[in-house]
Image: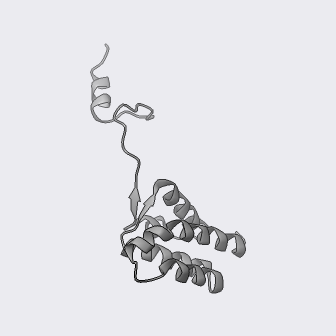
Amino acid sequence: MPEAELRESVLAEIRSASPALTRAVPERDLAPALGQVVAEVDADLGFRLFLRALKAYGSTVAEDQYHRLLAIGERLAHPLTAVFEGLDVRWPPLDPGRRDFEFGFGLPGLSRMFDGE
């Protein structure tokens, strides 16, 4: 991936998480400082510092941003655990009526074992 494109994707994630970082640490301007690191130094270093800030201050990220962060980490050849370990993700609520799993588990899977002949 070209460095300019990588910088822009990291900067976009920092901008989207800026309100959460500001709420977590109102006395510091983390988002602009992280953006400056990405723009002037290195996108990889800025991404690592951004992840560290999200984890250290307990800022919650949405599920779609979580997947984008994983994709950026994959492009930078970071291990998956370096991205998701310690990250607070706001997952959508579970729907107990959902039945679109390719394999059964839990009570529905158990009841299928005794169903029929």
Using the image, determine if residue 95 lies above or below residue 64.
above
Residue nearer the viewer, 83 or 64: 64
Residue 35 lies in quadrant = bottom right
| Residue at the image position 58 percent from the left and 84 percent from the top | 37
Residue nearer the viewer, 57 or 73: 57
Residue nearer the viewer, 44 or 110: 44
Figure quadrant of the N terminus: bottom right
Residue 74 shows in this picture: yes
* Farthest bottom residue in view: 41
| Residue at the image position 31 percent from the left and 29 percent from the top | 108
Q: Give how far across and how far down residue 47 sits, in percent.
A: 54, 75
Colouring rule applied to residues:
one colour
| Residue at the image position 63 percent from the left and 67 percent from the top | 9
Q: Give how far across and how far down residue 101 sits, in percent.
A: 43, 35
Using the image, determine if residue 43 lies above or below residue 90.
below
Using the image, determine if residue 21 lies above or below residue 42.
above
Q: Give how far across and how far down residue 82 sits, in percent.
A: 45, 70
